[in-house]
Amino acid sequence: MKTFEYGDNEIGSKEVTLGIASMVIGFGILVLPRTIVSTTKSIDGLISIAFGGMLVLFFTWVLGKLTTQFPKQNLYDVVCLIINKKAATIITILFALYAMLFVSYEMRGTADISKLYLFDNTPIEVICFTFLLVVIYAVSGPSVVLLRLNLMFLPIVLLILAVLILLNINFFEVKNVRPFFVTEWSGIFKATKETVFSFLGFEIFLFYNMFMNEPNKMVKSVMIGISIPLLLYIIVFIIVIGVFSTDVTENLLYPTAELARLVEIPGGFFERFESLFFTIWVMTLFTTAAMAYDITLLALNAVFKKVKRMTLIFILSPIMFIIAMVPQNVLELAIFGELISYIGIGFGMFFPVLLLLIAKLRGVKGNG
């Protein structure tokens, strides 16, 4: 086995692929069918997923090319080389703020669905605070250890999702996915925007690139990583629409989770399959929040090099908790998530394109 797989400060292509997949697969897959059918009819939402997927694949390729050109360097180092140190400081701090908001959103989203399906008598603040404590514990150690957790957690999450899909095949009705091509293009494009939002998270490798041992494999790794959730989104959307129809799906808060409520295990071994489903699903919500928190720390440490990691954790954690408690209902949480998504599009899509263009025009190259 290659030595880098045991290196304390290095990751390989598998960690990159599963890291991106784990970051993207999370809260979004639970609500994506509902957001898509709000502007599309029948199974036409698949077109939106395909369009959104192609867009994200392109921007993921751009990010891969950028990180390959500047191996072993994080966003702060790259912007210092391409533009200047002052711009790097401002952009990195803004990225850290974006990642902070991302953590707060994931934290609150996890608490909301946990209260709905698992802890219906527990105050939302208690669930949120407990989840935050676990995330704090995770980010207190090295970043590469957190990335390697995906090698263990993600296969389990994918397995439970596969079981969920297979157990719902009997409820699938072909009439629910007909007719085809009945949605106007304006509805298709609106749903494409929502699809793109659900793919955000791959931008974390603007920082995790510094740990990549095989930078020449970065493009391939990130492309495979983003293709996993794309395939899952397509399958889950087809199953949800086939089981519930578009009219019902539009009125379900978490359509994917509702699939778990339909499942009946012979013999009564599991009386509530959705409890098992969410117990496992919390694993990917945890890794998503933990990686976002870790990126926040890496970004701030890149600017404030003398500040210790634990000091930042003690300062940031109460702020994140307070932000997570600001939304008062599901609608406000959705607005909060949409705001974060627009910021993520800027950092994950347009900004890497801009950096790569400036680097090409100025002839700037990394140290690789």
Image (cartoon, helix red, strand yellow):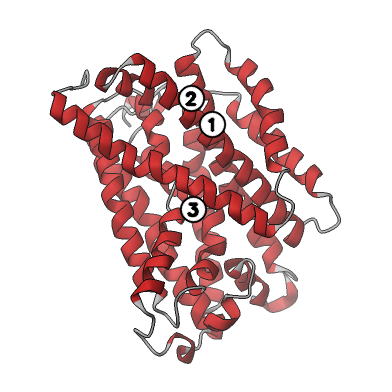
Residue drawn at the location 56% of the way across and 63% of the way down: 31
Query: Foreground: 32 or 361?
Result: 361
**Residue designated by label 2:** 93
Check if mark 1's residue and mark 2's residue have beta carbons within 8 Å: yes
Q: Which quadrant holds the N terminus? A: top left
Secondary structure, mark 2, is helix
Q: Is residue 142 above or below residue 339?
A: above
Residue 22 in sight: no
**Residue designated by label 3:** 25
Nearest to N terminus: mark 3 or mark 2:
3
| Tag nearer the camera, 3 or 2 | 2
Report the amino acid beneath label 2: Ile
Q: What is the distance, in whole Å, between disc 3 and disc 1 at their CAs? A: 22 Å
| x, y percent for residue 42 | 44, 83
| x, y percent for residue 33 | 51, 69
Report the amino acid beneath label 1: Leu
Report the amino acid beneath label 3: Ile
Residue drawn at the location 27% of the way across and 25% of the way down: 71
Residue drawn at the location 79% of the way across and 44% of the way down: 125
Residue 208 in sight: yes
Horizontal side of residue 258 vs 243, given as left or right: right
Q: Which mark is residue 97?
A: 1
Q: What is the distance, in whole Å, between disc 1 and disc 2 at their CAs? A: 6 Å
